[in-house]
Amino acid sequence: MNKIVRLNEVSLSTAVEKLCQADANLRLVVDQFGIPPLWARAPGFPTLIHIILEQQVSLASAKACFDKLNSALDELNPESFLTLDDAALLRIGFSRQKTRYSRILAQAIKDGSLDIDTLIYDSDEEAFSKLTALTGIGPWTANIYLLMALGRPDIWPGGDLALEVALQNLLGLDHRPRGEEFQQLAEGWRPHRAVAARILWHYYLSQ
């Protein structure tokens, strides 16, 4: 069985140094703004709900909704989440679509069809496959969970607007790179693409 590697502050710093030696553009970002945060999140149901809330909205808006959800419950877990009806979730800030996605996730964990606690032992491919098997958890959501909650070092989340904008600005492109172009631009950063993503997020947020 392959050993599962999880990023920490030490391995992040080491990987940043390697990327800066190999890529002048990333070195410019780090020289100007410093090493990016680890941005680690705790594995589990609450974090995955938070990432679902972040789909296609600002981070601030998602956090406000997530904070309201936590205030509405003594403890955020699948069982407690399922006690909230649609009207309650709408007041908190859930869209109808995200209400549906979050209920599917909560029910899957509750009935055991998704064992979220064991994802930490799965390969990137296995964890990604299990997550995206659920309606509402697409590639971006699964990859952000792997990158931030599972700490996987070589995840590159396609469809991330902030990364697209950061790449466009950093490379002086006349368009946001998407799809295959977005993937190809990160090929040289293997096996540290999740660290490159953190450098680019740091650049995006520091502009």
Image (tube, rainbow, N blue to C red):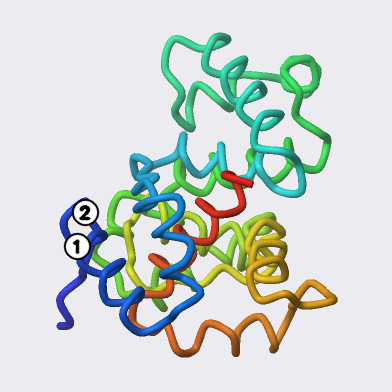
Which residue, given by chain and number where applicable, does mark 1 sit on? 11
Residue at 38 percent of width and 41 percent of height? 41
Q: Position of residue 132 (x, y in %)?
A: 57, 66
Residue at 78 percent of width and 15 percent of height? 91
Circle 1: residue type? Ser
Q: Residues within 10 Å of mark 1 (few under 14, many from 20)?
A: some
SS under mark 2: loop
Residue at 56 percent of width and 39 percent of height? 49
Q: Position of residue 53 (x, y in %)?
A: 66, 38
Give the quadrant of residue 171. Answer: bottom right
* Side of 176 where 78 appears, left or right: left
Residue 130 against residue 56 in the figure, above or below: below
Q: Quadrant of the N terminus?
A: bottom left
* Side of 152 where 136 appears, left or right: right
The label on residue 55 is none
Q: Are marks 2 and 1 in contact (CB under 8 Å)?
A: yes
Circle 2: residue type? Asn
Residue at 61 percent of width and 52 percent of height? 204
Which residue, given by chain and number where applicable, does mark 2 sit on? 8
Q: Position of residue 127 (x, y in %)?
A: 40, 68
